[in-house]
Amino acid sequence: MRRARIFAVGVVTLGFAFIVISSAAAAAEGDPKAGKARYDLLCGSCHGTSGKGDGPAAAALTPKPRDHSDGKYMNTLTDKYFFDIIKGGGASAGKSPLMPPWAGQLSDQDIRNLVAYIRSLAVPPYKPPK
């Protein structure tokens, strides 16, 4: 009886740990749907709502905003690169200082959501490394 109770407690504990770890991993990956809402609000004026770098402000910018739908280029970049450039702005990555840093307005999770959404724009589609 005692062994059965210990076994049951162990199974429940392992199950709970698995759920917590799975939830944390899913949160770390980012939610493209939540990312789209932020992208449309914060990025669309330069990068365009479809990510082609053709937003209403793009015509006045030099250099032009990056085309996020260009999978041939975008798929070569890491999630960390996107995260860092969104958080710290273009100047922090040796890119255009016109790309603002969003660290003060966005949480790390918001930025991960944006990265997930940006990944969804690539043609051909992004395939994460295994």
Image: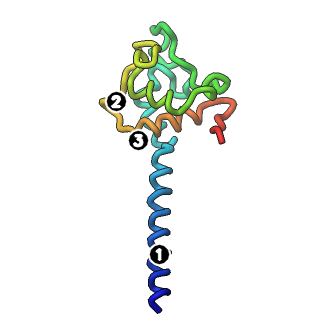
Which mark, by number, is residue 109? 3
Q: Earlier in the sequence, mark 1 or mark 3?
A: 1
Q: Alpha-carbon neighbours of circle 2 within 10 Å: few (<14), some, or many (≥20)?
A: some
Q: Which of marks 2 and 3 is nearer the N terminus?
A: 2
Query: Where 25 sits versus 121, above or below?
Result: below
Q: Which residue lies furthest to the right in this view?
A: 124
Q: In this view, does 95 lie to the left or right of 73?
A: left
| Amino acid under disc 2 | Ala
Q: Which residue is drawn at 45% across and 82% down?
A: 6
- Camera-side residue of 13 and 72: 13
Instruction: Locate residue 64, reporting x and y percent.
Output: 51, 12
Q: Which element carries disc 2, helix, strand or loop?
A: loop
- Camera-side residue of 72 and 40: 72
Which mark, by number, is residue 10? 1
- Camera-side residue of 8 and 127: 8
Instruction: Locate residue 91, reporting x and y percent.
Output: 41, 15
Residue marked by disc 2: 103
Q: Alpha-carbon neighbours of circle 3 within 10 Å: few (<14), some, or many (≥20)?
A: some
| Amino acid under disc 1 | Gly
Q: Which residue is drawn at 50% across and 32% down?
A: 80
Instruction: Locate residue 30, reporting x and y percent.
Output: 49, 43
Q: Earlier in the sequence, mark 2 or mark 1?
A: 1
Which of the two discs, 1 and 3, sits closer to the camera?
1
Q: Residue at x 45, y 85 (%)?
A: 5
Instruction: Locate residue 67, reporting x and y percent.
Output: 57, 21
